[in-house]
Image (cartoon, rainbow, N blue to C red):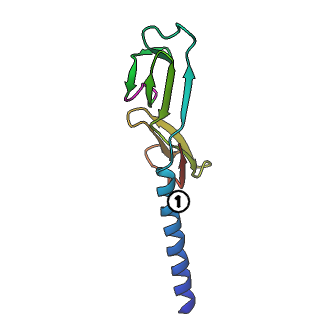
Amino acid sequence: MHGMRSVFLLQKSFLAFLVAMGIIVALGDAYCWSKIHKPGEAKNGCMLNGKLYPFGHIERTEDCYTCSCSERGMECCSLFHTPVAYDNKKCKLVFNKEHCDYDVVQKDDPSKECIVYARVG
């Protein structure tokens, strides 16, 4: 009976570790980048993937970034976190532009979700 208790405590500790790591990864910084404009390049706003965005704060681009646009340049951060720890033999990533996030689904049945152990921003 003592051995069963040890196994239960070990499983409980491992589950607590996974939950803590999930919270840490979810709270991590998003992926960010910046672009400095050449003089006169941004006369009417900032161009991103063929679309012109106005100067100022851009809450959400078509590609799921939040940006700041000025005549000097553009700074953007992703609104999504990319899954990095999941069963990539049975599962695949599908980007969901509506929710600005990746869905991780089974390859043979995309209606079923897979467990994700870690994401990066």
Q: How many labels does the image show?
A: 1
Q: Residue at x 39, y 37 (%)?
A: 99
Viewer-proximal residue among 117 and 88 = 117
> Residue 98 vs residue 36: left or right?
left
Image x and y of residue 27, in percent = 46, 51
Q: Residue at x 49, y 45 (%)?
A: 105
Specify few, some or many for label 1: CA neighbours under 10 Å numbering under 14, 14-19, or 20 or more: some
Residue tagged 1: 21
Q: What stretch is highlighted in magenta?
A: 59-63
Viewer-proximal residue among 30 and 88 = 30
Viewer-proximal residue among 68 and 21 = 68
Badge 1 marks a residue whose secondary structure is helix
Q: Main secondary structure of the magenta part?
A: loop
Going by the picture, which residue comes out furthest to the bottom? 1
Circle 1: residue type: Met
Image x and y of residue 78, in percent = 48, 35
